[in-house]
Amino acid sequence: MPIVTFKEQEQVLKYRTDTIHTDKQTKRISHTTGPATCPLCGGLDGAPHILLRCNNHTLKRMHINRHHHAVSLCGEEIGKGKLGSAIVTMDACNSEKLSDLNIEPPDDKERNIPDWVFPTQQNLPSRLQSRPDGVLVMPIEGRGRHLDPKQIPPKNRDIHLVELIICSDIDPQQTLEKAHQPLIQRLRTRSLRGISQNNQVTVHVILLGVGGTI
Ligand SMILES: [Zn+2]
């Protein structure tokens, strides 16, 4: 795991103790009343705002990079384990490096689910489908031992969608409601003869609190 710098630790502690530098904090110290306004986007300022919701271009890019970096770390770790060969997509590009070079991270391309994962092969255009952070395909237990996910017949596939969400440490529930239901429906095989013979699709949500307590 990467080393957390002293500066980063300091900022996390400030966030946890609600003393991070924001307009809200400035108003509190100077005993000024009125709504706290974000100097970058004009939104309602506060710690969760700058860490999660600010619309400023630079901050948004930092938020995207933080998310991609976390997904890359998860992908790396899964890749080392026994599920490594089951990974079909996992946001693996190191967007932080790209961003350092002032290149926009390619948010869409790497996250597309390949057509072969869909049982009907009639996939919707990628812009119309939700894109989980990771897709793993393995055989359902007792129905084959293929190591290459592509070789597993659609009805025997055990499909796992991974979604990593960076959320506020105090109220993750609302972010959990983001769903991939339409995508799940399209990934399912629908043999009516043997319902128990159909594939399985599971969503795994990884929640990461910005303050490090989840
Ligand atoms: Zn803002």
Image (spheres, rainbow, N blue to C red):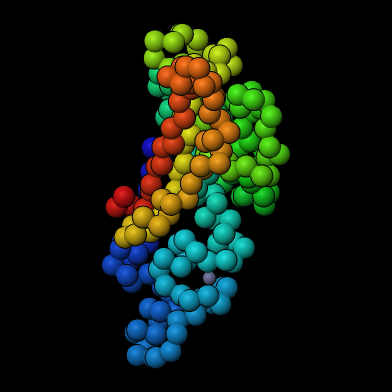
Q: Is residue 173 left or right of residue 185?
A: left
Foreground of the two, 47 or 206: 206
x, y percentage for residue 98?
A: 63, 45
Residue 92, quarter of the rendered image: top right
Residue 152, quarter of the rendered image: top right
Q: Residue at x 39, y 42 (%)?
A: 206
Q: Residue at x 30, y 63 (%)?
A: 16
Q: Is residue 149 above or below residue 10?
A: above
Q: Is residue 214 left or right of residue 118?
A: left
Q: Residue at x 40, y 57 (%)?
A: 174
The answer to whether residue 43 of the structure is visible from this angle is yes
x, y percentage for residue 104?
A: 67, 50
Q: How many marks?
A: 0
x, y percentage for residue 199?
A: 48, 22
Q: Is residue 181 above or below residue 40?
A: above
Q: Pick out the residue farthest to the front.
A: 193
Foreground of the two, 6 or 46: 46
